[in-house]
Image (cartoon, grey):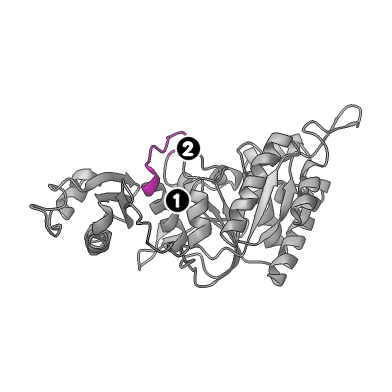
Amino acid sequence: MAELNEEHIKIALSEITVPGDRGNIVQSGHLSGIAIKDGLVQISIETTPEKIEEMEEVRQLCEKKINEIPEVLNTTVVLTSERPPQASKASPPKDKPTKNLTLPGVESIIAVASGKGGVGKSTTSVNLSVAFSKLGKKVGLLDADIYGPSIPRMMGIKDKPQQTQNKQLLPPENFGIRCMSMGMLVAEEEPMIWRGPMVMGALQQMLSEVEWAPLDILVIDLPPGTGDAQLTLAQQTRISGAIIVSTPQDIALLDARKGLNMFRKVSVPILGIIENMSYFICDNCGTTHEIFNRDGALNTAKTENVDFLGAIPLDTKIRETSDNGQPIVISDPESSHANSYMEIAKKVINSLGET
């Protein structure tokens, strides 16, 4: 067979009919999106709110049928509905979403989050993951930023995930850490132009259809902000705790508090706040410059009654080692910066034991 394309998917789906509609699912117009990346297939099926339950069976049939194509590594099919049903005034409130996604063999899941981009969250996730590993933990690292994946470069990984016999994905490793990222499946400069449901399908796939176990800690590097991806993961996944990363800058801390409150609303424990780019020490004169303000994250931690985990400076070495795929905890383990990450990792491990 030629390279996998949309036509192969449509041919497979042409055998599936939709209850109450004429023709197959392709002809009926329910098929609203197909994305194919290196054998991973994402499908979205449009339906209406009142037909969600009966369309679930169709969704499962589609997933099964596509997985039968030899070139397909894995498939995620999601149902989308444009308009939610109008709630009746007499209707009781809906229950909160249950945290039904568990990962067998993974003891703890840690979400590393930030209210806004550009605060060094991914650099923090990478160095903390390495620090956990150096402290004797079996560690995995999931890059949940579909639109801007950076973990493959920071972890120095160029390999693609392999497929196991049961069609699970085997995550590549470096520094003893299992890693998974959309950046391993697409070219580094290729944009991901996906709708929200397909993004959530990809995240679910990278969580539940990857051979993570056995792990002591799975670190999830969340995308910045408090959007659908962050909220859905927090609602549906049994996250052991969240770490908030922020600079000392007032505007960054304002967004950090939004992230903190989001986790509180979905009952995810807050493990603490890390102040990144806390200060800069001049190479020439040795003077300390607090470029983004002073003690902002420390004061926020006190106000919000959460732990302050530590401060990481703004330093060229941290940036260079991240860009080169050699995290500073690995490349310069005796440095003060590496020691700071190690101390934070110890605090987090202690907190996990208390939750």
In this rendered view, identify the residue nearer to me: 283 or 61: 61
Q: Mark 1 vs mark 2: which is more N-terminal?
A: 1
**Tag of residue 160:** 1
Other-residue count near label 2 (Cα within 10 Å), few / some / many at <14 / 14–19 / ≥20: some
* Amino acid type, label 1: Lys
The quadrant holding residue 107 is bottom right
- Residue of label 2: 188
Helix, strand or loop status at disc 1: loop
Indicate left or right for 120 with 106 as reference: right
Residue furthest out toward the left: 22
Magenta segment range? Answer: 187-197
Closer to the eye: label 1 or 2: 2
**Residue 191 counted in the magenta span:** yes
Q: Quadrant of the C terminus?
A: bottom right
| Label placed on residue 220 | none
Residue 117 place in picture, x, y as percent? 60, 38
> Does residue 260 sit above or below 317 in this rendering?
below
Which residue is located at x 38 percent, y 37 percent?
Answer: 193
